[in-house]
Image: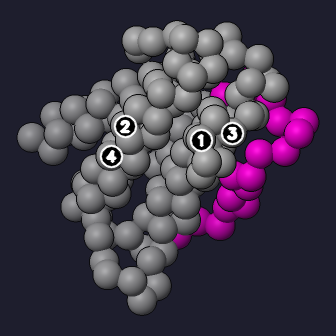
């Protein structure tokens, strides 16, 4: 039963990850770096932010492993290819941790924060990734009119 639940959560998370990558594919580095809304959000920032979120929640907070978390500040030399490669590397690392863990296992690296389990963390990552993939849809449409997954 737990394995079915894990497979479902991971399939949904992977779909959202891939949706985000699809949204940045084919966009120039310059356009991907450009903030399109007053909050300063750009396509590259979304990819970098989610790369950081996976490392923070799975590697650091759940597994309590030391990790150098990538910066989610967009620099003038950042590229779509590097950001996507970093994101794919991060999700392969987190997927290995998730595959070796039980959904009811508690986070080991939260310190004094309220304890949550891997199931909660995966639901949170799914929500966060889906939310930002939706933002990417809007930003991409503002950049070049491209819509759809």
Mark 2 residue element: helix
Give the extent of the magenta segment.
Answer: 64-85
CA gap between label 3 and label 4 equals 23 Å
| Foreground pick, 25 / 66 | 25
Residue 21 visible in rendering: no
Nearer mark to the viewer, of 1 and 2? 1
Residue 107 in the image: x percent, y percent? 38, 70
Q: Secondary structure at mark 4?
A: helix
Q: Is residue 84 magenta?
A: yes
Number of residues whose C-alpha sits closer than 10 Å to that of mark 2, classed few (under 14), some (14–19) or many (20 or more): some
Crowd around label 3: few <14 · some 14–19 · many ≥20 (10 Å): some
Magenta stretch prevailing secondary structure: loop
Question: Which labelled disc corresponds to residue 130?
Answer: 2
State the mark number for residue 35: 3
Is label 1 in contact with label 3 (beta carbons under 8 Å)? yes
| Residue position for label 1 | 37
Taking the image as drawn, is residue 138 in sight? yes
**Residue carrying label 4:** 127
Q: Which sits earlier in the primary sequence, circle 1 or circle 2?
A: 1
Label whose residue precedes the other's in the sequence (3 or 4): 3
Label 3 secondary element: loop
């Amino acid at each position: 039963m737990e394995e079915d639940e894990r497979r479902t959560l991971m399939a949904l998370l992977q779909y959202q990850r891939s949706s985000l990558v699809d949204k940045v594919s084919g966009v120039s580095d310059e356009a991907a770096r450009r903030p399109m809304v007053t909050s300063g959000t750009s396509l590259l920032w979304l990819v970098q932010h989610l790369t950081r979120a996976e490392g923070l929640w799975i590697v650091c907070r759940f597994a309590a492993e030391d990790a150098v978390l990538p910066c989610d500040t967009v620099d003038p030399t950042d590229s779509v290819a590097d950001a996507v490669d970093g994101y794919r590397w991060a999700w392969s690392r987190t997927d290995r941790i998730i595959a070796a863990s039980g959904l009811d296992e508690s986070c080991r690296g939260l310190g004094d924060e309220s304890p949550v389990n891997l199931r909660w963390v995966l639901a949170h990552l799914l929500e966060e990734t889906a939310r930002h993939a939706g933002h990417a849809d809007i930003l991409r449409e503002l950049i070049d009119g491209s819509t759809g997954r």
